[in-house]
Image: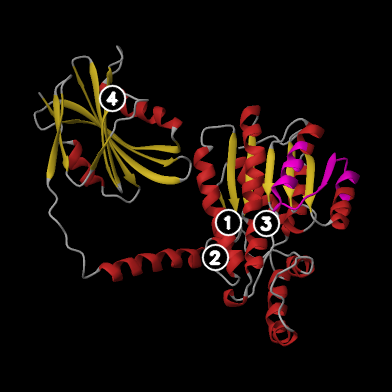
């Protein structure tokens, strides 16, 4: 996250108008130096002039983000001018509302090239330098609500879904680094995107161009879309929501929460279809059990045989790991710190989790006993793994022969913790 924007450098693609221009205004009024990139020189110069009148230092670059060489030149020019980049807004975008069966491949190349590969190219040329700088940095990738719920325009929605997936992966890979990541998913915003796209599409060769009779039929639909945009969110207000996301490390920047029921309905449909598909043809096999036996210190643990045994991580004190979707069983053995008490174990585990998660919450922390009466500590921790996925962890700790034995079982927040306990409490010291 970034709390203080003074002196930071923000690069904004698609920065000449609409959302990009409003982002530039929001960063500039907080003391940022601005790099504006766009294909429209006239509006680019106009926006730059507006920002300079407020005292902001602005670099202007004509950039087609679907051209990797132009994006590379944008990065070089930004670092040559300012010596650093703290904020990257991969914001440039184009659209297409034409039915899939009518589209030429050139339409797909254009929209995916700008909307998806523009984000990929921008991240590629800026990310490593951001990481190496050790300064607080942030990447904001502009998707859309159409990246969460498929709408009209096959290439547009496809590209925006791709931006969400790319951003989710990027956020995990950048977790616990100096680079934060958000994905912007706005609904209707008051911009001239439709007219801008009409103008831009005329400059591209090979695109499907609707015949006059189709344009006439589509005229009411285009007018409806323009009305919806006109009644949409003020882009300056939306830009302030982006600032809030950056200062609070909010990943999904969903600026129109009224669409959440529709987003939820999509996932409800997935669940309903999965249940319908499999309601009569799942043959439930009986789950047996396996035994893990540790030599030193000696102990046993019984676990379901539908868990796949994996190699223990060489980077930790892990001695055993078995996994299936929704159940990750790990056993750790380490030297017991001299002053550590059993009641300290859950807090210690929570502290160690900071390398892998945030929003860490200890749900329960209590003394317990194994089946043979051995004192143990049971802790339940909820967290957001890699800053993205809600998870729940059961930890069972015992001390033996100056060793700390810890059984950790983790899964999604909605997994049944009682199933985890059955495994953990099978721990038997020898």
Check residue 37 for magenta coloring.
no
User: Please, what secondary structure does the residue beneath circle 3 have?
Assistant: helix
User: Please, what secondary structure does the residue beneath circle 2 have?
Assistant: helix
Magenta residue span? 50-76
User: Which one is in front in this view, the residue at disc 2 or the one at disc 4?
Assistant: 2
From what the image shows, is residue 237 above or below residue 293? below
Given residues 87 and 394, the one toward you in this image is: 87
Q: Position of residue 61 (x, y in %)?
A: 81, 46
Q: Earlier in the sequence, mark 4 or mark 1?
A: 1
Question: Residue 343 bears which disc, if any?
Answer: 4
Given residues 157 and 189, the one toward you in this image is: 157
From what the image shows, is residue 341 above or below residue 70? above
User: Please, what secondary structure does the residue beneath circle 1 have?
Assistant: loop
From what the image shows, is residue 310 above or below residue 200? above
Q: Where is residue 161 in the image (x, y as percent from the top left)?
A: 54, 59
Q: Where is residue 200 in the image (x, y as percent from the top left)?
A: 77, 65
Question: Residue 114 bears which disc, if any?
Answer: 3
User: Please, what secondary structure does the residue beneath circle 4 have?
Assistant: helix
Please give the residue where the numbered disc 1 appears in the rendered image: 254
- Residue drawn 51% across the image and 48% down it: 168
Please give the residue where the numbered disc 2 appears in the rendered image: 259
Given residues 332 and 203, the one toward you in this image is: 203
Give the quarter of the figure containing the N terminus: top right
Q: Is residue 31 visible?
A: no
Q: Where is residue 156 in the image (x, y as percent from the top left)?
A: 61, 65
């Amino acid at each position: 996250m970034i709390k203080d924007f003074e002196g930071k450098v923000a690069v904004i693609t698609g920065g000449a108008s609409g959302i990009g221009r409003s982002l530039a205004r929001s960063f500039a009024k907080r003391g940022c130096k601005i790099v504006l990139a766009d294909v429209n020189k006239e509006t680019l110069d106009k926006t730059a002039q507006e920002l300079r009148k407020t005292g902001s230092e602005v670099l202007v670059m004509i950039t087609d983000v679907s051209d990797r060489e132009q994006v590379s030149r944008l990065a070089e020019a930004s670092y040559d001018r300012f010596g650093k980049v703290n904020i990257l807004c991969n914001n440039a975008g184009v659209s297409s509302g034409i039915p899939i069966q009518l589209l030429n491949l050139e339409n797909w190349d254009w929209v995916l090239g700008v909307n998806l590969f523009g984000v990929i190219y921008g991240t590629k040329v800026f990310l490593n330098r951001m990481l190496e700088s050790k300064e607080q940095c942030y990447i904001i990738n502009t998707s859309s609500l159409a990246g969460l719920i498929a709408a009209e325009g096959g290439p547009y929605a496809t590209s925006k879904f791709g931006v969400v997936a790319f951003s989710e992966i990027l956020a995990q890979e950048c977790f616990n680094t100096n680079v934060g990541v958000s994905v912007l998913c706005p609904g209707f915003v008051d911009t001239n995107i439709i007219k801008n796209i009409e103008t831009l599409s005329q400059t591209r060769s090979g695109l499907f161009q609707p015949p006059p009779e189709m344009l006439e039929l589509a005229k009411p639909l285009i007018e409806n879309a323009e009305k919806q945009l006109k009644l949409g969110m003020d882009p300056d207000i939306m830009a302030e929501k982006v600032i809030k996301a950056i200062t609070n490390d909010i990943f999904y920047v969903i600026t129109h929460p009224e669409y959440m029921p529709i987003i939820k309905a999509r996932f409800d449909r997935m669940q309903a279809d999965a249940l319908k598909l499999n309601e009569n043809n799942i043959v439930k096999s009986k789950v047996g059990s396996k035994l893990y036996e540790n030599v030193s210190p000696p102990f046993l643990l019984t676990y379901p045989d539908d868990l796949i045994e994996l190699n223990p991580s060489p980077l930790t004190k892990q001695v055993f790991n078995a996994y299936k979707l929704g159940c990750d069983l790990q056993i750790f053995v380490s030297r017991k710190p001299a002053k550590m008490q059993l009641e300290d174990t859950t807090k210690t585990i929570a502290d160690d989790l900071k390398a892998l998660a945030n929003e860490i919450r200890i749900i329960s922390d209590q003394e317990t006993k194994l089946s043979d009466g051995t004192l143990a500590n049971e802790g339940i921790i909820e967290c957001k793994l890699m800053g993205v996925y809600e998870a729940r962890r059961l930890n069972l700790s015992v001390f033996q022969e100056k060793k700390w034995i810890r059984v950790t079982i983790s899964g999604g927040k909605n997994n049944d913790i009682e199933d985890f306990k059955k495994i953990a409490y099978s721990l038997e010291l020898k």
